[in-house]
């Protein structure tokens, strides 16, 4: 029995008359469900340990659809190294349940989807932008957002934290706020962290990443597939070949192209060399 048949038997028993659709495409096991089933399904996966690792949550925009946004949850099983993708659709003014209560790692993924597409995740404790700046208007990965539109940030964020009722107590008011970055010896890169300190003990931290987003995905939409390599190259300049290979493998899978064994071996060698270089840079910088 393959994984799709096994999943179908399991989920049909757990969620009868649910209307789930099971497909296998480009090497991926896919289960398409209504958005109301996402949270129960994620809980089921974790409770049964069928898939014990949420790898990522990603969004996509299909304006021609009645529900234009597609949300995909990528799961991995450490038991048998198999993967499963849950897919659902969300309308323009609809919300979808956050899965943070089950998988804390979904926090930044959901914030990114909100930032890039405007999808609202109900139950998310801190749904705000994560890649674009605080003055940004709109959502850049929507298909109707112009690729050449630029929005400048003219106001700095305050050093103090925004009001948060979770931290409203006498002890919090006595803490010392400290801004680390964006150019600071401790960060080894463009990263800003706001912390609340009690001596040398960090009680609270907030990270600002906005100025790092290059909208690589939008550039990929406006270029032929073979002209995207310079953009994947820039995702991590210390280990660029790994990102290049990842993108190329996705294109090859969609085109049903298999490269010769010699080229596959060369990819592994280049990826390993870049991994070593990346580690040496990190160790040397510290």
Image (tube, rainbow, N blue to C red):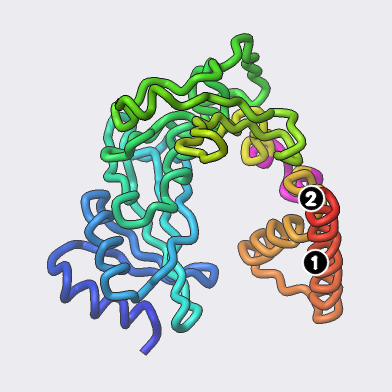
Determine which of the numbered discs, if any, sits on residue 114 in the image: none
**Outermost residue to the left:** 17
Main secondary structure found in the magenta portion: helix
What span is colored magenta in the figure? 220-230
Q: Is residue 239 shown left or right of residue 179?
A: right
Left or right placement of residue 28 versus residue 209 in this view:
left
**Is label 1 in a helix, a strand or a loop?**
helix
Q: In the rendering, at what x and y percent does residue 282 appear?
A: 79, 53
Which residue is at 48% across, 55% downward?
56
Residue 160 image offset from top left, x and y in percent: 50, 19
Q: Does the magenta segment cover residue 92?
A: no
Q: Is the C-beta separation of discs 1 and 2 under 8 Å?
A: no
Visible in this render: residue 236? yes
Residue 223 image-quadrant placement: top right
Q: Looking at the image, tell me whether mark 1 or mark 2 is earlier in sequence order.
A: 1
Q: Residue furthest bottom?
A: 1
Would you call the spot at circle 2 few (<14 residues within 10 Å), some (14-19), or many (20 or more)? few
Q: Is residue 285 above or below residue 167?
A: below
Q: Which mark is residue 286?
A: 2
Residue on which disc 1 sits: 271
The verdict on residue 226 being magenta is yes
* Residue located 66% across and 34% down the image: 191
Q: In x, y percent, where is residue 45? A: 31, 68
Q: How many marks?
A: 2
Q: Position of 35 compared to 85: left or right?
A: left
> Outermost residue, front direction?
199
The residue at the point 73 percent across, 56 percent down is 243
Q: Is residue 142 visible?
A: no
Rounded to the nearest whole Å, what is the CA distance between mark 1 and mark 2?
23 Å
Q: Nearer the viewer, mark 1 or mark 2?
A: 2
In percent of width and height, residue 214 lies at 68, 34
Up-down: is 285 above or below 210? below
């Amino acid at each position: 029995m393959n994984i799709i048949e096994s999943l179908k038997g399991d989920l049909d028993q757990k969620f009868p008359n649910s209307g789930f659709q099971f497909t296998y495409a480009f090497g991926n096991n896919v289960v398409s469900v209504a958005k109301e089933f996402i949270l129960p399904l994620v809980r089921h996966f974790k409770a049964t340990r069928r898939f014990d690792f949420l790898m990522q949550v990603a969004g996509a925009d299909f304006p021609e659809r009645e529900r234009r946004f597609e949300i995909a949850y990528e799961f991995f099983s450490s038991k048998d190294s198999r993967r499963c993708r849950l897919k659902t659709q969300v309308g323009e003014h609809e919300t979808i349940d956050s899965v943070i209560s089950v998988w804390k790692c979904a926090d930044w993924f959901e914030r990114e989807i909100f930032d890039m597409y405007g999808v609202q995740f109900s139950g998310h404790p801190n749904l705000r932008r994560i890649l674009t700046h605080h003055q940004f208007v709109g959502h850049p990965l929507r298909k109707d957002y112009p690729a050449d539109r630029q929005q400048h940030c003219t106001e700095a964020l305050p050093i103090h934290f925004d009001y948060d009722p979770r931290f409203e107590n006498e002890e919090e008011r006595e803490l010392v706020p400290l801004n680390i970055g964006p150019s600071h010896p401790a960060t080894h890169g463009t990263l800003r962290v706001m912390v609340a300190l009690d001596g040398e003990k960090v009680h609270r931290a907030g990270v600002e990443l906005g100025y790092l987003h290059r909208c690589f995905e939008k550039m990929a939409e406006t270029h032929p597939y073979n002209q995207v390599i310079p953009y994947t190259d820039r995702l991590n300049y210390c280990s660029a070949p790994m990102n290049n290979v990842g993108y190329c493998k996705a294109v090859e899978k969609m085109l049903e192209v298999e490269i010769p064994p010699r080229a596959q071996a060369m990819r592994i060698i280049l990826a390993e060399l870049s991994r070593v270089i990346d580690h040496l840079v990190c160790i040397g910088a510290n």
